[in-house]
Structures are given as C-alpha cells and as structure tokens.
Image (cartoon, coloured by chain):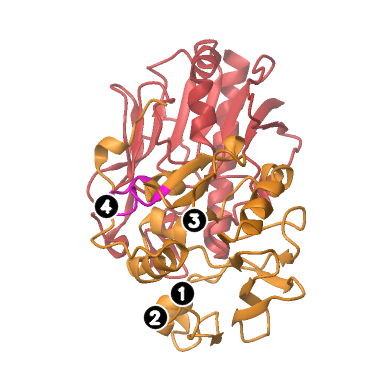
Chain colours: A red, B orange
Amino acid sequence: MIRAAVISNGLGGLHYYFQSNDRVDYRWLEITSDFDPDLEGFDLLVVPNGCDHIALYRIRDKIRSFLDAGKTLFCFDGWFTAWVPGNQWYMDNTRKTIDIRYFKGTDRYDLFSGVDIRSLNFSHGISGWWACGYIDPAPGADVVMFDTWNRPMIVLDETTTNGLMFLTASGPLADATGQTTDDKSSEKDLARFYINLLELAEKKRQYA
Amino acid sequence: MHKIGLVFNGVWSHYAFATAPKYADIYRLIYIHELTDETVDGLEALVVPFQSNQTELGRRRSVIYNLLAHGKKVFVEGDSTADWLDAVWEDRPVNNYWWVTDPHNPPVSETDFDHPVYNGLSKRHSCWHTHGAYVSIPDQAAVIQRKPDGDIITWETRQYGGVLMATTLDPIVEHGVQQITHLDHYVDSLTHWLCGIRPEGRFEVPKERYGIRV
C-alpha cells in the first residue's frame, strides 16, 4: 500500500478529495507558520489544486531529498515559486480557452489507459477548463500531454532526480474529482487517470 | 502606498492578481500566517479571497474584527466558516456553464444595482458563477444578491463598525486565474469602493513574475 502525504493549506472541502482506501493511505500535512514536515516514511507526496507555494518553497530542500531517495511527487497545481526541481510552471493568458485542445504525448507507462482525453478537453461543452498556463519541462522529461500550441500540460520527470515527478499545468486530479467540474464524463475519466497514476506510484514504491 | 491587504494563502491566483502591474500598487499580499494587527495597520481595507486557509482565519479572526472596529472595510469572497464569520455558508454545485446551456438564467436573479460595487455593472458582469450560498447572515446585514431559489449570494453589514461585505462570487481568484475576461469591470468597481482608487489598464502578469524564489 502506498503511504501518501497530502499537503493541506486549509481549503474548505479539501479532505473530501483524498480518502484512504485499499490502494493508498493518506496522511495530511497541515501548513502552519512553522511548517517543517517529516517526509520520512512516505512513498508519495501529493500537492493538490489550490496549494500554498510559499510553504512548499520553504521546504524545497526537503522535497528534493525526498525525491532523491527515489520517492514520488504528484503536483496538480500551478507552482509560481521555484520549488519543483528542474521544471517550472507559468501562467499565460494570451491563448483563448475556446481554442484549447489537449493531445497525448509520450506516455511510456500507458497512463491514458481507459481515459478518454475528450473528457479533459470539454466539461459541459466548454474547453480549456482543466489546466491553466503551461510547464517549462526539465531536459529529458516526458511531455505526457500537450495543447493546441504544443505547450506541455502534463510532465513526467524521472531524469532530474532519482524519484518520479508527475506534474500538471494546474489541472486537478484526485480520487474524487469534483473540484472544478461536475460533468460526469470528466469526473469518471479524471478519476481513472488518477488511479493509473497511483498504480505507477505503487510500481515505483516496489522497485525503489 | 498599498491601500488594500489581500490575505494570501500561497495560492497562485492570489499571487497573480496582487502582483499584476494593474493592481500591484494598490493591493499588498499578507501571508495568512503573518496576518496580525501590525501587518494590516494603515490599510483602508482587507480582502479575504476564495481558497483561503479557513483554519487559520478562525485562529486570527480578531484581526478582521479589530480592523472593522476601526471603521475599515472587509470584503470576503467564496466560502467561509462560522468560526470567523457570524454567518452560515453551505456548499452548492458550481454552475459555470449556464452561459452555454441556459444563457437567459444566470445563477443570480436579484441584484441591488444601487450598491456602489454593482452600480454601473451589467447583469453579465455582476455574476459569472457562485461557490455555495449563505443560509444565515448577521442579524443587521442587508442582502445584495440572491439566487432564484432564495439562497443569499452577497450581503453587507455595518454592525461591526466598518463595512463587512461577503459574497460567494470569486472575483479576485477568477481574475487571477485569467480565464473570465470581463472581470475588470467587477474588480475595478470593487477596488474603487474599497479604497477610492479605480485601477486602469489591462490585466497582465509578466512572465518574470513566475518561478520566483521567496
């Protein structure tokens, strides 16, 4: 079973989205003024949508050590501070959401298995709803999904550290995915996508 | 000289909004874990945005009420808890697609357009989507916006000294997200009401504002 730490910055309803089950045991790390969590004993660090990137920057060295120990990071939020090793997220409002479409890129672990990418493209007929901005990926990292203008939307990086980083351009993923959509197709496919991620994290745990 | 404090939960939309050149001289980010009477001293108003740290707001509620006791303005958007607001907020499904599926029935059906924030706004600019609703508000509060089912979206009261206005709209966060393109109208009107300055220009965040070290 995956031992996962989820960062919480006190958002209302956040705990609903990550419920422990037979695949993963979630523990919450609540951000306080003296936030300095112990990441020992965890296999996976989850940064949910809407997180605190000031607090994460302050523990960046600890996160780097966690990854160098072969562990896994999921970041489903736009990191405007430079705490993610080798990769940087940028917001960009120069593209119209009506023109945004997503395309599969390098998917060496078959993370899109059972996932209809149209569910990420449209929620209630509206496009551009899932992600914001784009990622400037580290050299050698996989661009798992890109958009209309070839901008990286999802990055999988196993080269910058000894661990695994799965990063979205602020696109939410979770066990329950009602955070920014109540479109049933989108909820189903995003939950499927997240389960595929957990299966990858489990393999990483077993072979770390 | 900053006039308005923006309670900052480390969230990127808060950061993008307050550091955009259009607003950077007016709003000052105040990290939630550093929200004290001293850090809000000298401000005309305080904004508590959606996606705030509800636990910490409960711990630091005295800062908000001390500011109100000094006659200042406080604007609260999105959700809240009864730990720091004398009101009851409840979650509701977020309908952010009504303008596609049912464009003649926006989530808000009644708006007091005589209120300074809403005066001059079109119906379209006064509601995009809502995050939950208030089912109970302070005893001397006046309702500014309602949904068709009677749920309260926006209210205001002067019973704490200054003016406390709360809404389940999310103008600051959505403006920071930069996907709804008409929000300058609402946010500029709100900013003017809060501090007497009406921002001008286009909302943009330079690329160099990202990837920062703090």
The answer for how far apart the CA atoms under marks 3 and 2 are is 23 Å
Label 4: element kind? loop
Q: Chain of mark 3?
A: B
Q: Badges 1 and 2: C-beta atoms under 8 Å apart?
A: yes
Q: Earlier in the sequence, mark 2 or mark 4?
A: 2
Residue B64 belongs to the span the image colors magenta = no
Per the image, the residue denoted by label 1 is B117
Q: Earlier in the sequence, mark 1 or mark 4?
A: 1
The answer for how far apart the CA atoms under marks 1 and 2 are is 8 Å
Taking A189 as reference, is A70 above or below it?
above
Q: Position of residue B145 (x, y in %)?
A: 58, 80
Q: Chain of mark 4?
A: B
Check disc 2 and give the amino acid type. Leu
Q: Quadrant of the C terminus of chain A?
A: top right
Give the label on residue B204, or none: 4
Q: Mark 3: few, some, or many residues within 10 Å (few <14, many ≥20)? A: some
Per the image, the residue denoted by label 2 is B121
Per the image, the residue denoted by label 3 is B44
Q: Residue at x 45, y 78 (%)?
A: B118
